[in-house]
Image (cartoon, rainbow, N blue to C red):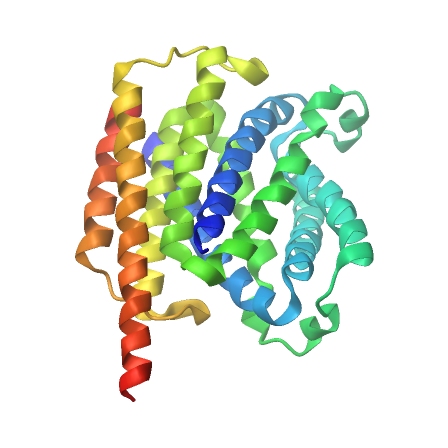
Amino acid sequence: MKLIYYVFALLAGIALSIEGAIYGELGNSIGKLESSFYNFFAGTIIIGLIMLFFGKGSLAYTFKAPKWTLLGGLLGSIYLTILIISIPLVGVGLAMISVIIGQMIASMVIEHKGWLGSRRFAINKDKLIASGLMIAALFLIF
Amino acid sequence: MNILLLSATLLGGVLLSAQSSINGVFGQKAGALESTFLTFFTGMLFLALAVLFFGQGDVLLLLDAPRWQLSAVLFGVSYLFLTILAVPKIGVTAASIATVVGQLSAGMVIDHFGAFGGVEVAFDLKRFIGLLLMLAALFFIYRGNKRRVEATDADSIAS
């Protein structure tokens, strides 16, 4: 049953790639920070409408939530801006490799330590094998 | 200069993972749609300030940009929403690796056709083997996670 969530994450990755490819182009014509701003501006409108009609959760929780859980937007906007700046200079391939390596190391450390509210999950053999395979795959692809 | 840029993109990856974890926590209490909305809304506020003070482009050029380029936001929204659904269920490592596999597979397809105005890079044997290795990596992460779930179940029965 959990398999469906792996499919979700795969689809998320596909979306991320298409997004990056298109914003690279947009960034060249209207500016890097401006492209990043456009993404969050238009995204707010789209998801705002969807949430109004289909949201079952509680946005009011925002004011009760621990403040650090509100920082996702800040981190996301820094990420996107860094990417839009560096892709034209170092190339999509190299940029993706460093993003992915940063992502893999960070997520394993986060889970290993149980940081940022994630459930603790020690680094194990399966995870190390998986990272090794990913690094080999990166070498072959680029 | 390049080393600096590459360290910055590495940091970008770290931030992306931290964001996934944080949003997963917030989303479980407030709802996935609400968490996606909050991320976009606060991101917009921060970037509005950044554009005001440091912007060198011209936001108004958006009105002249080709419409298909503006569709990128749909993918941005889908990415965030799907991640917020997945992370609490399978953990941030599994979600990150599955995301990466999707990212690279799509990247190879985009490259092969030179879609979206990018450079054309043909899909070859090396890339095919790379794809197989990534699928194997995903399998190991899945297996590692399943074992953990079984172990937790055994713990709760024992206690």
Where does residue A46 sit, x and y in percent of width and height? 76, 45
Residue shown at 73% from the left, 49% from the top: A47
Q: Does residue B50 show up?
A: yes
* Residue B119 to residue B26: above or below: above
* Residue B87 to residue A141: above or below: below
Lateral position of residue B29 relative to residue A127, left or right = right
Lateral position of residue A138 relative to residue B91, left or right = left
Q: Nearer the viewer, residue B40 or A4?
A: A4
Residue furthest bottom as drawn: B159
Where does residue A86 sit, x and y in percent of width and height? 46, 31
Residue shown at 77% from the left, 51% from the top: A50
Q: How many marks?
A: 0
Q: Quadrant of residue A43?
A: top right
* Residue B122 to residue A88: above or below: above
Where does residue B85 sit, x and y in percent of width and height? 55, 56
Residue shown at 52% from the left, 42% from the top: A12
Q: Quadrant of residue B147?
A: bottom left
Q: Nearer the viewer, residue A38 or A135?
A: A135
Where does residue A6 sit, x and y in percent of width and height? 44, 48
Residue shown at 61% from the left, 32% from the top: A32
* Residue A74 to residue B6: above or below: below
Q: Does residue A142 show up?
A: no
Q: Nearer the viewer, residue B102 or A33?
A: B102
Looking at the rendered image, the quarter that the C terminus of chain A falls into is top left
